[in-house]
Amino acid sequence: MSETDEVLNRWTNLSAYWEKHRETIRRLFAPVSDALIEDSDIAAGSRVLDVGTGSGEPALRIAEVVGAAGEVVGADPVAEMIESAARAAAQLSLENARFEVAGVDSLPFADSSFDAVVSRFGVMFFPAPPNGVREMLRVLKPGRKMALAVWGLVDANPFHHSLVRLVQRYFPEPALPPDAPDAFRFAAPGKLKAIMVEAGLDDVTERLFRFPINASLSLEEFWTLRLDMAKKLRERFTALAPEAASEMKREALDAFRTYSTPEGLSFPGEALIVSGRKGGR
């Protein structure tokens, strides 16, 4: 199985779980959605493309902002994710949101057809990020903006590292190659910015975005959420002997407890928001 097929297979298997936890996941990363809306100059009446929309975010949030006079199109290569997003739009009666199965390397849209193009935590998994960014630029109108969100350094994101380091102890693995599809592929400052500059965007900026990742969940509920959100973690946990699984879970709950509040759990988060403008008018 190719690297690209492995990524698609992973997200296909996750689609039902992401739909199950849709509202919780929406709240977890809502600040990042709003940052993308701000940095891409999305406003009422805008026509927006959300690439790698998954189960529908930030497209569903954008639909609220652009209103009846605007439109948002969510694109993702995983059909099951697109079906989930379409169900959510119908449940929310969002007639200005539609979703299409499409990979970033060959977007089925006309040149210069969108007022803004965004992607939240998607570019890290693109088969060839430079090609994907160029294709996103193709469908963006001249003078308009693209904004991409990627995770910052793993050490600054305990939402991830509280489990990543624990799993590494139980299942040691060599470090991934620098450009392997992974959540932290573009965590190094300047790495994604350089790709966007090379792709031809003007006025490219990168900002460190710090935000709270709030989960109104108990420790047990959060443990279930994290298992459901990560296929590899779930598979590895279920493969452990009962005693080892019990110990791993206990250690995980202890790590989460550090971030407990009266309202649930709150993790500090860091992302990079990289944006630029298409030249011309």
Image (cartoon, rainbow, N blue to C red):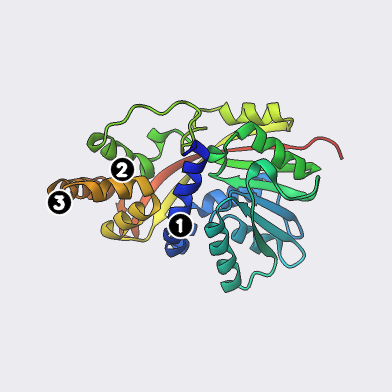
Question: Which residue is disc 2 drawn over?
Answer: 163
Question: Is residue 265 depicted above or below 160 in this figure?
Answer: below
- Provide the secondary structure element on which disc 3 rests: helix
* Closer-to-camera residue (225/129): 129
At x 23% / y 37%, what residue is drawn? 170
At x 61% / y 41%, what residue is drawn? 148
Judged from this view, the residue extending furthest toward the left is 243
Question: Is residue 271 depicted above or below 87 in this figure?
Answer: above
Q: Position of residue 178 (x, y in %)?
A: 47, 26
Question: Is residue 29 depicted above or below 136 in this figure?
Answer: below
Q: Is residue 151 visible?
A: no
Q: Specify the amino acid type for callout 3.
A: Pro
Question: Is residue 222 depicted above or below 200 in this figure?
Answer: below
Of labels 3 and 1, earlier in sequence is 1
Work out which quarter of the rendered image holds the C terminus and state it: top right
At x 50% / y 42%, what residue is drawn? 5
* Closer-to-camera residue (208/134): 134
Question: Which residue is disc 3 drawn over?
Answer: 242
Judged from this view, the residue extending furthest toward the front is 1
Of labels 1 and 2, earlier in sequence is 1
Q: Specify the amino acid type for callout 1.
A: Ile
- Provide the secondary structure element on which disc 2 rests: helix
**263 left or right of 116 in image:** left
Question: Which residue is disc 1 drawn over?
Answer: 25
Disc 1 to disc 2, how far (Cα)?
Answer: 17 Å
Q: Around disc 2, counting alpha carbons within 10 Å, would you say few (fewer than 14), some (14 to 19), or many (20 or more)?
A: many
